Amino acid sequence: MKERIFENTIKLMVGDGIVNSLPYTLTQKNCEKVMIVCDEPAYRLGYVDLVKNALSSSPIEVKYIYKGVGDIALDTDAEDIARNYKYFKCDCIIAIGKKSAIMAAKGAKVLITEDVRYVSSFKSKGLTEYPTDNALLVCVPINFGTGFEAMSVARLYEKSHSSIYEITTRYAATDILCLDTKMTDITPPKAIATYGLFALSLAIECFIDDDTNMIAKAYADSAIGIIYRYLNKCIFKNANNEYRQKIMEAVGFAGCGYAIINRNELLSPLSDIISDKYLANFANIYAILFRQYVKNIELGRAFGYALNSMVEPNDFALYAKESRAQKTLAQIENLFKNIEDCVDFNAHLADFGVNEEDLESIADAYERGNENKEYTKDKVLELLRACL
Amino acid sequence: MRDFFEFSNNVKIIAGENSLERLPDLLINYGGYRVFIVSDDVIKKCGHIDALSKILKAREEITIGGTYLNIPSTLTVQDLDKLYIAYRKSGADAIVGIGGTRVMNAAKALALLCSTKSKDIKKFNGIDAAVQTVHIPFCLIPSTFGAGNEVSKDVFVIDEQNESPIEIVSSSVQPHFAILDPNILKTLPEKELYMSLIDVMAYSIASYLSKRANILTKSFSKMAMFLIKDNFQNVLQKKDINAICNLQIAASIAAITYSNTFTGVAHALAAALATKCHMHRAEAICAVLEPVMISLQDICKSQYAEMLLYYRGSQDYANSTEDERSEAFIKIITNIVKHLAKAHNVQTSLSEYGVTEADFDGIAELAINDMEMLTTPKKYTKEEIIEILRQAL
């Protein structure tokens, strides 16, 4: 019998104004001194103030605000955050912003946990096997999230080597994920469409991964259910808090589910390569790749189960078991088409400036960075061409 | 729409045959080197303590500080004090609880005291009153699987001085990790195994119907139901070890869910019957489940229909009309309960446990004030509760 491990200990907090519940939650976690890490938009748009104001009514002190994270999380950001965290004797990091702020905070958390000063130390001595110190990490995304908040990975750009360095450890995981609709009140429909379809992709992965389990499927089931009921509504009425909250929930759930299963060894690195090279939105690239990838996988019973999350029970019961997987696939494609029709969603790699001539170099980059023999260069190229 | 919701599960779950062997690595992973084992004589007689000790001793970094087996069926503050003193004397830096409900309850209470540096359990009475200040690696290894105590957030202690219960609901009582090894269930008496199955079903249904249920908790309940549907026949007929493990997982999933939603009237009644009439919780559930489900039928019609799909699959669902589905669901659940009860000589009426009409008032009073009633989908009057008891008599 195969051993199964279920680990996702993230506390999810969702709602309009839910950041106001942070003082209570942090007090429960015994936090007293907080460090805030943010990017420029989070600061400029007043989202940091929302969190500060919420904390001001409690005995929790904001000891330092690190505002220096740019569009990409740098190793030096993580190092600076960790240094200040220790200097101010903090016991909690609240990361507010987009992916880069969250990644920098995750990197800092690993440095603090491992008690090292430089990210480069991990290359020489690796991760400590059994660290015991821990810094509480709260993530407050100001977009719909990318699922990265939930994952046990910190992804940093190493300035000195001009390369991306990934640290995978459970100590890079978020402890509390706080999804507040007040942080997404100016999200345009196109972005909502992107995050919704990205969440759908992650959620479907939770049904098809070889090592999936029922907890991952439970998260995925909720995410898919929400996306099919609310994504269209949210795109058309993006000012509606209820709809935005629903889609934020879906992205959060999908991320939590995906964090439990194996990372897709084809789509994830390929999306990284393309989004880095063309400065494209990772979630958008992932969704484009997933749409084509899913058409070529072996459709098993588990895939058919996902249909249960997409349609009402009455409709689900009408499909014979053997036809459910095909119907699931059709439902996925229908949603993509539907969204494409109603919003200017970037549905092709070409929309990001990728040309036929670039595909070879992307496939080469994938081959260089990945040892997975299952995905040959030809297979990668075939997928890329389908997405062009 | 509810404005806010929160969902959490702090427990890492490791499930599978022989997963007990992972314990030393996991303890070290969480910084535990000197272990205090909480268990009872039954578990020792079954050989599980010896097996556990052997596994721990195989790793030279780990020592066993002490083993405490004197766990009573109802934990009092005084019992807990003795347990705490034994732990302190042992010089241990980690707690491992192996056993059934009472062992896990005691281990959770002990871990709460240790991690909060407190000697007074009474001050944690209620919801979320505890704040951890010390990291004590804590693991639970269940020898039954009904209530999913290994992941649930509740602890129950009796304050014998004031003759009152201390009910603690807090994530601070959850272990860091739980090991679900079906080998440990091999020694579980058949009757206990089936009672556990009824427990899991009841929890998954109650949390699905809870007023605090949301789309995520419903998905968790749904997955627990799928696991029950796909595995319970294999457990009943073949005692298949993989199927047993899947039911253990179902119990944990159901418990993660009810830890976020609470349960409802059936469990409030079961707790009251356990307190007033000393009934086993699963036996009480067997007796009250049908009248409780009937009492909720009008307002939970659509949820019953959905659960019919999860418990029985699409064919039964498609073959019944919308009106028939809730009826069919009640019938299916009560038939399973009755079938299991009959096969193992479990009485399904309260009178067979010595409950009489004279007891109703006290039971109803206790049940209606239980915090589980806060999330039941219908507001019950005392008379309605008494009516349920009457039907279950």
Image (tube, rainbow, N blue to C red):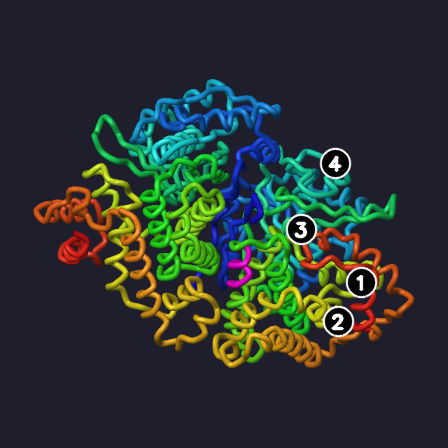
Q: Secondary structure at mark 1?
A: helix
Q: Which mark is residue A256?
A: none
- What residue is disc 3 on? B38
- What residue is disc 2 on? B287
Q: Tell me residue A4's x, y (percent).
A: 45, 58
Asked whether the residues under the numbered discs 4 and 2 touch, taking CB atoms below 8 Å apart as contact, a structural biologist would say no
- Dot 4 amino acid type: Lys
Give the magenta range: B217-223
Q: How far apart are the two marked residues, 4 and 1, measured between alpha carbons?
A: 30 Å
Q: How far apart are the two marked residues, 3 and 1, measured between alpha carbons?
A: 28 Å
Q: Secondary structure at mark 4?
A: loop
- What residue is disc 4 on? B119
State the residue at coordinates (46%, 22%). Answer: A86
Asked whether the residues under the numbered discs 1 and 2 touch, taking CB atoms below 8 Å apart as contact, a structural biologist would say yes
Question: Is B90 on the left-hand or right-hand side of B273?
Answer: left
Q: Which mark is residue B273?
A: 1
Residues beneath discs 1 and 2 located on the same chain: yes
Can you say which quadrant of the picture contains the C terminus of chain B? bottom right
Residue B374 lies within the magenta run: no
Of B157 and A139, nearer the camera is A139
Report the chain holding disc 3: B
State the residue at coordinates (89%, 64%). Answer: B359
Q: Secondary structure at mark 3?
A: strand
User: Up-down: is A295 above or below A324?
Assistant: above
